[in-house]
Amino acid sequence: MNEQFNIADFADLQARLAHVRQPGVLAALQRDHCSTDDLAALLSPAAEPLLPRLAARSRDITRQRFGRTTQIYAPLYLSNYCVNRCAYCGFSAGNRIHRRKLTLDEAEAEAEILRSRGFQHILLVSGEAPAVLDVDYLEAIALRLRDRFAAVSIEVQPLEEDEYARLFTAGITAVAVYQETYDRRTYDRVHLAGKKCDYDYRLDTPARAAAAGMREIGIGALLGLSDWRAEGLAIGLHLAWLRKHFWQTAFTVSFPRLRPAAGEFEPLVKVNEKNLSQLIFALRIFDPDVGLILSTREEPRYRDGMLGLGPTRYSAGSCTAPGGYSHEDHDGEQFSVGDHRSVDEVCRVIRSRGFDPVCKDWDRTFQQAL
Ligand code: SF4
């Protein structure tokens, strides 16, 4: 496709947020269909005193669109080799960690462990090292897993459209690729070496995956790198652009906050739980149908408190090191998780709050019919 998404100067987004006053927030809370100006209002400092009203509106919309359900998934780390140097990541090429890539048999064994725990949706994750883990490998593991799981997603290096199309045929139905930060200057500051330094190539990746026919695309920003309000507005603009061009595709947004990792990178900005909540509520009100993901990066108290208020998908029982489900040793993990509970414990809490944990929202039968 010729048309590409572009983001205005980040400072312009910040200026849009700074000009909002409370009547603008109240007007946004009344609307059935929010514009990006409404999203700016909901993300602005002027909306902070109205956070309980944002929460109530977000809760009502979430219940209306998704019912009393919470989807559950687990990541399966295939490899922690990476050729990029991202200042904030434990897998960064500069970090001295134990590197490992699972063989296809080992990856299959890890997937079996997750399946035995009840998971029907898994997310295959790896560092970005195409010479170590390439499309052939991903295609082979997809072919092995596709009949055993309702949904297999990937969060790996950005690929070309024909490569995504090949993986879709092999059984991968969703792609997650986070911009990390939409702030170009900060992006350049934290991406020190490797192909990931190319901001625009990464920004175009969700569109390439959607054009290839992927059923669901996940976007997001890593919180702690730049102004979270402007990141939220940039996510909303990106989401609206993708919806306009790929109306048949489903979308999710993730809100990973920086966690301790090898390299001991300190967040460049603070994003507290109140900020994260405002971001989630604002995105839900702006786009009632978008899936919102809250991972095990967050602590149990916060995750439990957010049930039903906006997020629709939780990871559970996660390990972020390759082979981590088969071995107790979590050496070589990407970051340390905040919620260490088992999937059974997480599901118990979900049920105790009157929600149904849902381990699948897709079936391969649908894909075969496409
Ligand atoms: S964030 Fe991704 S690309 Fe960057 S170092 Fe970590 S695994 Fe590699």
Image: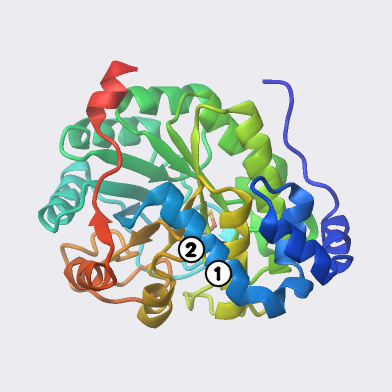
Instruction: Give the residue at the far left of this rendering.
Output: 116
Quadrant showing the C terminus? top left
Q: Is residue 65 placed above or below 309 in the rendered structure?
A: above
The amino acid type of the residue labelled 2 equals Arg
Which residue is drawn at the image coordinates 32% and 64% (left, top)? 321
Residue 327, labelled with which disc?
none
Which residue is drawn at the image coordinates 23% and 25% (left, top)? 365
Identify the residue position indicated by label 1 in the image.
Answer: 55
Residue 59, labelled with which disc?
2
Residue 272 visible in the shown view: no
Residue 161 visible in the shown view: yes
Residue 23 % position (x, y): 82, 66
Element at label 1: helix
Which residue is drawn at the image coordinates 59% and 79% (left, top)? 274
Residue 228 % position (x, y): 68, 67
Real-space Cα separation, disc 1 to disc 2, in angstroms: 6 Å
**Is 23 left, or right, of 96 in this rendering?**
right
Q: Cβ–Cβ below 8 Å for labels 1 and 2? A: yes
Residue 147 % position (x, y): 17, 32
Between 235 and 142, the one lying in front of the other is 235
Which residue is drawn at the image coordinates 86% and 68% (left, top)? 18
**Is 328 left, or right, of 76 in this rendering?**
left
Give the total of numbered labels: 2
Q: For the residue carrying disc 1, how many other residues have a C-alpha within 10 Å: few (<14), some (14-19), or many (20+)?
A: many
Residue 11's quadrant in the figure?
bottom right
